[in-house]
Amino acid sequence: MSRYDELPWKFEPRPSTSQRLNIHTSPNTNARTIQNIKQCKHIPEADVEELCSKVIELLIQEANIQHVDTPVTICGDIHGQLHDLLTLFKTGGECPGTQYLFLGDFVDRGFYSLESFLLLVALKVRYPDRITLVRGNHESRQITTVYGFYDECVRKYGSVNVWRYCCEVFDYLSLGAIVGGKGGVFCIHGGLSPDIETVDQIRILDRKQEVPHEGGMCDLLWSDPEDVQGWAISPRGAGFLFGENEVNTFLHHNNILLIARAHQLVMEGYKEMFNQGLVTVWLAPNYCYRCGNIASVLTIDDDLNREYKVFEAATQDVGAIPSKKPAVEYFI
């Protein structure tokens, strides 16, 4: 039997916060936690549990599709590359001065998945209206047990508890966002689904669960755009490939200007497709510390104009890199 067979993958409803918590974190305490995370200092397990509990209090009030005002900076996969996340904040502006929308895949493959995720969670707790977190396909119990996050948590804490706290947070993350209201930008981690024609259909999904293996919620996190006619089977084993006609139909039916998504490595940092109706943005430069790609973020201003900012990987002290290699076999 695999060691993963005994893991708690089945979603269990979390007790209400009134039952579990009577804790109020002061701004100063949260600021210290943010600084400690940035410096890769060990965060006590009890503090991680409190942080995850407090962010769930916020996320449970958010919709499946969050409304996000402009201006906002949209960011793709970071995959545990903490130093590159810190570079983003230095070049793009610190939160709350800059509003951010992250499109998921915070964890796995990189050496600092836990710190990357905890930093975003801590910023969400301190500035809830200035940062939006969307779920990616790697925010999943099954995926994280294979691609590094589970092992990282056990290595750093000696138990699965911290991994479990983070997985609870995954279940409450929004599935997407709309920037700028009608005529704006639809933001999702993966792509479209043959089961979903309108954004309103996403709003009524039950997102508080482990990512399903099929169906609309699965497709939103796993699908990819491609030069195909109609819908095609995805080589990932989940989600679909979808073409220009499907994108144009979705844009028209939902009064949307652009679909912004992540999920796929783009060597140039971003890639526009289908007459600029869809863009893929990628945040992790030199992906897995070996791909040589650059990264980009997309800023949408008050007039819904687009500005792409590209940057390269952060210079990192080789001695500070853990000796254990992350899982890199699965690149898509």
Image (cartoon, helix red, strand yellow):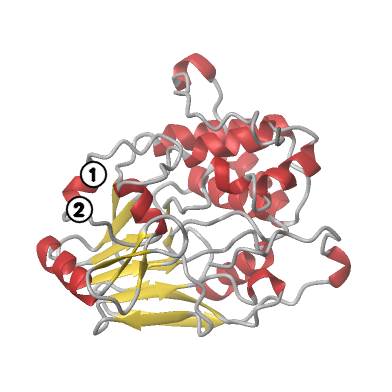
Q: Judge from the rendering whether residue 155 lies leftward or rightward of residue 260; answer left or right.
A: right
Residue 317 spot, x, y in % from top left: 83, 71
Where does label 1 land, which residue?
Answer: 203
Q: Is residue 137 above or below residue 10?
A: below
Residue located 58% across and 70% down the image: 284
Number of numbered discs present?
2
Mark 1: secondary structure = helix
Residue 203, image x, y percentages: 23, 44
Tell me the residue that label 2 is attached to.
199
Does 290 sit above or below residue 61?
A: below
Question: Does the CB distance between marks 1 and 2 fall below 8 Å?
Answer: yes
Place residue 325 in its image quadrant.
bottom right
Whole-number angstrom distance, CA of label 1 to CA of label 2 = 7 Å
Q: Which mark is residue 215?
A: none
**Residue in the image at 60% along x and 63% along y:** 330
- Left or right of 154? Residue 239 is left
As drawn, the residue found furthest toward the right would be: 319
Q: Quarter of the image for the N terminus: give it.
A: top right
Q: Position of residue 316 (x, y in %)?
A: 77, 72
* Residue 67 in sight: yes
Q: Secondary structure at mark 2?
A: helix
Asked if residue 236 lies left or right of residue 65, the reply is right
Mark 2 is surrounded, within 10 Å at the Cα level, by few (under 14), some (14 to 19) or many (20 or more) other residues, namely: some
Q: Residues within 10 Å of mark 1 (few under 14, many from 20)?
A: some
Which residue is painted at 21% across and 67% down in the image? 184
User: Which quadrant of the structure image shows residue 48?
Assistant: top right
Look at 40% across and 55% down and name the residue there: 221
Instruction: Tell me which amino acid carries mark 1.
Output: Arg
**Amino acid of disc 2:** Val
